Image: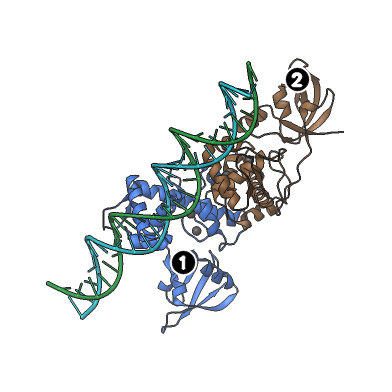
Chain colours: A brown, B blue, C green, D cyan
Amino acid sequence: MASQTEENYLKALYSLSVGKMEVNISELSAALNVSNPTVNSMVKNLKSKGLVKYEKYKPISLTEKGRKAAALIVRKHRLTEMFLVEKMGFGWEEVHEIAEQLEHVNSSALFERMDELMDHPLVDPHGSPIPDRQGNISESAYEPLSKFSSGRKVKLAALGHSSTEFLKFLNSRELSLGTEIEIKSIETYDGSMVLSYQNHASETFTKAVCESLLVERVG
Amino acid sequence: MASQTEENYLKALYSLSVGKMEVNISELSAALNVSNPTVNSMVKNLKSKGLVKYEKYKPISLTEKGRKAAALIVRKHRLTEMFLVEKMGFGWEEVHEIAEQLEHVNSSALFERMDELMDHPLVDPHGSPIPDRQGNISESAYEPLSKFSSGRKVKLAALGHSSTEFLKFLNSRELSLGTEIEIKSIETYDGSMVLSYQNHASETFTKAVCESLLVERVG
DNA sequence: CTAATATGTTAGAGTCTTCTAACAAATGTT
DNA sequence: AACATTTGTTAGAAGACTCTAACATATTAG
Ligand SMILES: [Mn+2]
Ligand SMILES: [Mn+2]
Ligand SMILES: [Mn+2]
Ligand SMILES: [Mn+2]
């Protein structure tokens, strides 16, 4: 059984590994808000437990065992977030901090019950996929809105990141997952996009925002 | 903010203080499954934080601050147990271990939402009262079934203790909170009672069991 | 009241997680 | 290539929580 601290290291390593296959000591210390020497010693510890691959001065990667362990924590995190939104009425911007704690609860019964009560959801409230009981995850193939051109109709499917500030910003624009969006025009100077959706005829979003809006084609 | 470990000490101290006003080092170490010296040093630590009163070789008691802190953890524990039973379909014998972990989650929003979703329940699934937001608790005045005499009609209101084994035993006899019970007869030799309730015309319970069945008079 | 027993305390140490200071290796820049 | 910068490692220490062994005090029994 990994400690709560070890679990947080595994999960951070897992998130940082998306796309890339290897992670630096410094990236991990930044993500976890601890010093480099702290990460260095914890990585040695995780190596001794067969959870990470690591050689002095080389980047770190998860072993298959470590990847699975991390995915199962992510599963608990995302099931919790979805449960808080779907069954307890929280907003999508309120759930991450709570899930950060609940993900360490040791009770398969609790998370299996959440899963059942929600009819086995496939994604969390931010559109990120929920790993299955075996730790397998179907990485979603959505593309950033910024990749599309004027006139295109798309549907908001997920977010590139889910900071509270970003989520509150989207709330203020009444933009939520599943919303159908039409690209009215694109400003060539700074890449900002003018969008139309629901009862918003014309809302402008910066390029940075549009890169974090992951969408799928519609129609 | 008290650590999870400190919270468990406070809560144990709180439970052991019911009735009595003071608690021994040894009682506490037995309850928490740690050694006497461990408790000794933790008690000094809690004293330094103003949570307990303690002098060398004397029994321990909670300060008002400590009592309130403990009651608020008990509140989270019992709200969680009730939520797991009422909203997630767990049995009353399954929830204690999960609540033992969830009670340490730092999120007033989570527990307030549970409270709201259940319409501010007054007791947990074992009939124990839930302290209010201020840490006030209304100690219930139920009496053990063993105190009553033959012919008396009562209603099961709470349990003297809630070990998994006891709860499973009550499940096997289809006895749950709220059940109306009539005392058919009492065996003078060993104090065992023959009870009638619901579709059980005649069930015998030992004195020990009847002392843990807390009831209120009916009719 | 003394002796035996039970209970509580101190000392010293170990694990886990973290830090800072100092040093070493790798990388980037002229 | 030589120097400067970034990145990673080692050493040493601290705090939180736990233990065992040894000692001290309090309680109980004769
Ligand atoms: Mn999250
Ligand atoms: Mn976490
Ligand atoms: Mn309980
Ligand atoms: Mn607990």
What count of labels does the image hold? 2
Task: Specify the farthest residue to the bottom.
Answer: B189
Helix, strand, or loop for circle 1? strand
Image quarter of the C terminus of chain A: top right
Give me the C-alpha separation between circle 2 and circle 1: 71 Å
Image quarter of the N terminus of chain A: bottom right
> A160 or C9, which is in the foreground?
C9
The quadrant holding residue A155 is top right
> A30 or B177, which is in the foreground?
A30
Q: Is residue A165 left or right of residue B53?
A: right
Q: Is residue B168 left or right of residue A153?
A: left
Q: Amino acid at mark 1?
A: Val
Q: Are marks 2 and 1 on the same chain?
A: no
> Measured from the top left, where is residue A111 in percent x and y?
64, 53
Q: Which mark is residue B215?
A: 1
Q: Amino acid at mark 2?
A: Gly
Q: Which residue does the image show at 52% across and 47% down from the upper left?
A: B105
Q: Is residue B66 left or right of residue A173?
A: left
Q: Tell me the crowding category of disc 1: few under 14, some 14 to 19, or many 20 or more residues within 10 angstroms, Cα based.
A: many
> B109 or D20, which is in the foreground?
D20
Question: Does the residue tagged 2 have its C-beta within 8 Å of any atom of ligand 1?
Answer: no
The quadrant holding residue A97 is top right
Q: Tell me the crowding category of disc 2: few under 14, some 14 to 19, or many 20 or more residues within 10 angstroms, Cα based.
A: some
Give the chain letter at badge 1: B
Helix, strand, or loop for circle 2? loop
Q: Which residue does the image show at 63% across and 40% down from the upper left?
A: A58
Viewer-nearest of discs 2 and 1: 2
Q: Which mark is residue B120?
A: none
Circle 2 residue: A191
Question: Does the residue tagged 1 have its C-beta within 8 Å of any atom of ligand 3?
Answer: no
> Measured from the top left, where is residue B49 in percent x and y?
35, 44
> Measured from the top left, where is residue A16 in percent x and y?
66, 39
